[in-house]
Image (cartoon, rainbow, N blue to C red):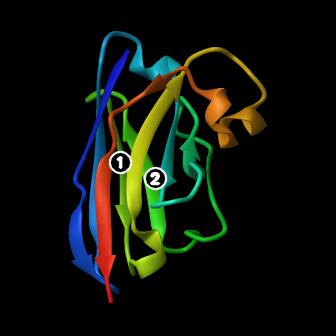
Amino acid sequence: VQLQASGGGLVQAGGYLRLSCTTSGRAFSRYDMGWFRQAPGKELEFVAVIARSGSTSDYADSVKGRFTISRDNAKKMMFLQMNNLETEDTAVYYCAADSVPVDFSLRYDPDGYDYWGQGTEVTVSS
């Protein structure tokens, strides 16, 4: 599967953005999907995950209550609604996918995914 993230941009603190991850290939509904981000000078970090069915999702503590992950299996797309953005959210955001059945806890780690998009940059100004 090929992934492409989009929707990033420059926004003021307190603003919002909606990231999208479009996919190609078959059987999108077989993939657990995740969002990760990498801030300048920092390591890649987990942001959110959604199970293949869409019934289960989870978030990093730093974004809980502000970000919402969702997916549309019919359109083969995943989304990240980001509200009340903070300067600390500035990063390149990546979407990731994997279909191998594993313990869901592995989806919180970048090593839990085989497929990655190219990233979309989010800059939050104060």
* Residue placed most toward the observer, 86 or 50: 86
Residue at image coords 38%, 15%: 1
**Residue 94 shows in this picture:** yes
Left or right: 9, with 68 as reference point: left
Q: Which residue is mark 2?
A: 69
Q: Which mark is residue 79?
A: 1
Q: Is 10 rendered above or below residue 54?
A: below
Q: Amino acid at mark 1?
A: Phe
Circle 2 — which element?
Answer: strand
Question: Considering the image in quadrants, where does the C terminus appear?
Answer: bottom left
Residue at image coords 55%, 51%: 48
Question: Badge 1: how crowded within 10 Å, few (<14), some, or many (20+)?
Answer: many
Q: Is 75 rendered above or below residue 69?
A: above
Q: Disc 1 and disc 2: Cα gap in Å?
A: 6 Å
Question: Badge 2: how crowded within 10 Å, few (<14), some, or many (20+)?
Answer: many
* Residue placed most toward the observer, 104 or 41: 41
Where is residue 17, by image quadrant? bottom left
Mark 1 touches mark 2? (CB < 8 Å): yes
**Residue 86 shows in this picture:** no
Q: Amino acid at mark 2?
A: Ile
Residue at image coords 25%, 29%: 75
Please provide percent x and percent y for residue 34.
52, 40
Q: Residue furthest bottom?
A: 126
* Residue placed most toward the observer, 58 or 90: 90
Circle 1 — which element?
Answer: strand
Where is residue 71, by image quadrant? top left
The mark nearer the N terminus, 1 or 2, is: 2
